Structure formats: C-alpha cells, structure tokens
Image: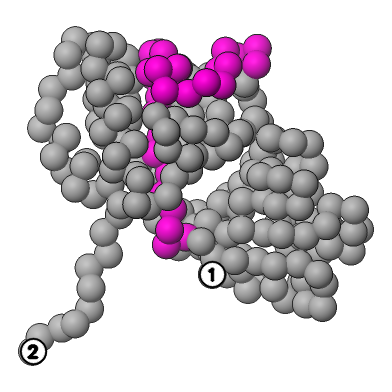
Amino acid sequence: MSSNTARRQSPLAAFMSRAEDDEAVGPAGVVISERPYLGHLNLRGDPADGEFMGAVERTLGFALPAAPNTVFCGEEVLALWLGPDEWLIITPQDGQGAVEDALNAALEGAVASVTDVTGGQTVINISGRNARDALDKGCTLDLHPRAFGERQCAQTLVAGVGVTLRWVDDTPSFDLVVRRSFAEHLALWLRDAALEYGAAVG
C-alpha cells in the first residue's frame, strides 16, 4: 500500500549530509550546525498596552524584552526584540502550535497578532574560538564582547543575507535566524569563511 506522507526534511539536511564526511583543515576553530524544527512565532503588539504585555507575560512566564536588540530566555522559550512593537518567539521543536494557541487565547480581543512563521525559517549556529572571526568577514556589526554579548540580538546582513543574529554564549556561539530559501547559501558561505581556521560541520 503506497503512502503519500511526505518525509520532513530540514532546510540544511543536504548541506549537513554532504559535509559530514569532510575533514577540517587542522583543529576545528569553527563549528557550523543547524538547529532544525524549532518553532518561530512573530508577535506584534503595543508595548505601552499594559493588558497586552501582562497577557503575554502570564502566557510565556516572562516579560517581553522592551529594550532594543535584547533577548529574554525563559526555561524553554526565547523572545527576541525585533522592533518597537514586534518580537520573535522561538519555541522548542514543534512547540509553536501550543504557544500560538495559548497566546491567541490570552490576547483575544486585543490589538495584537501572532503569526506562525516556522515553515519559512531555520536557525544556523556557528561556534568555536574563531566563530567571531568568520562572521566578521561578512557582517559589519561590532561583535566584540564589549559591544555584542549576553542577551543581545540584532537584525543584520551576513554575506548579503538578512538574518537575526543572537549571542548564545561566550564560547563564543551565535545563532543566525535565516529564511529557509537562503539557509544553504549562508551555510556554504560560513563554511568557506571558516576554512582557514579549521571548519567542522555537526
């Protein structure tokens, strides 16, 4: 009996598969990986509206970041500031549906919107002692720890590709939220930029 069920594949499945057998040139100073199937919700609302902010806080368990280019990390859910009235909510794998339903119920009647953008985005992680050096080749942001560090994010271009860049930890490690259609192009560029430091994919 045939089945029409499509097999789910992450945006970087082919890239990861091809790169698994490649050896790093020397010790790996940069590791590139994908964080597939995370949930992505675009949330819009007025931060001056106490009812909106309170409803979101009760639902997520934390207050939305109000300062520009900041991140709040809950136990499982992240909220990234994208603009004065816009946030990106990132959930665990396949968790966006439950969070979206809970937010919609809490915000019923409010001037707000919750949009599931999971299918159009993925997250590339770049880490290692030379991760910042590789990113510097294609990003004009100052990524020095004194300028870009804990609980910070920014919408920027990396190699001409629009991303939301988030500091993860001081390994250093960075997450790049990117549109699905540009993910492989960006991953290939990052790997090329990292080759002189020893690049690994995993």
Tell me where the magenta segment starts and ends, as one range.
118-147
Where residue 99 appears, x then y in whole percent? 61, 65
- Is the residue 178 above or below the residue 190 in the image? below
- Is the residue 176 above or below the residue 10 in the image? above
**Amino acid type assigned to the residue bearing label 1 in the image:** Gly
The circle on residue 97 is 1
Q: Dividing the picture into quarters, in which one does residue 120 lie?
A: bottom left
Where residue 76 appears, x then y in whole percent? 58, 50
Q: Secondary structure at mark 1?
A: helix
Which class describes the residues within 10 Å of circle 2: few (<14), some (14-19), or many (20+)? few
Residue found at x 18% / y 19%: 24
Residue found at x 65% / y 16%: 147
Residue 56 relative to residue 174: left or right: right
Quadrant of the rendering where the C terminus is positioned: top left
Where residue 189 appears, x then y in whole percent? 30, 29
Residue 96 relative to residue 66: left or right: left
**Amino acid type assigned to the residue bearing label 2 in the image:** Met
Comes first in the chain, label 2 or label 1: 2
The circle on residue 1 is 2
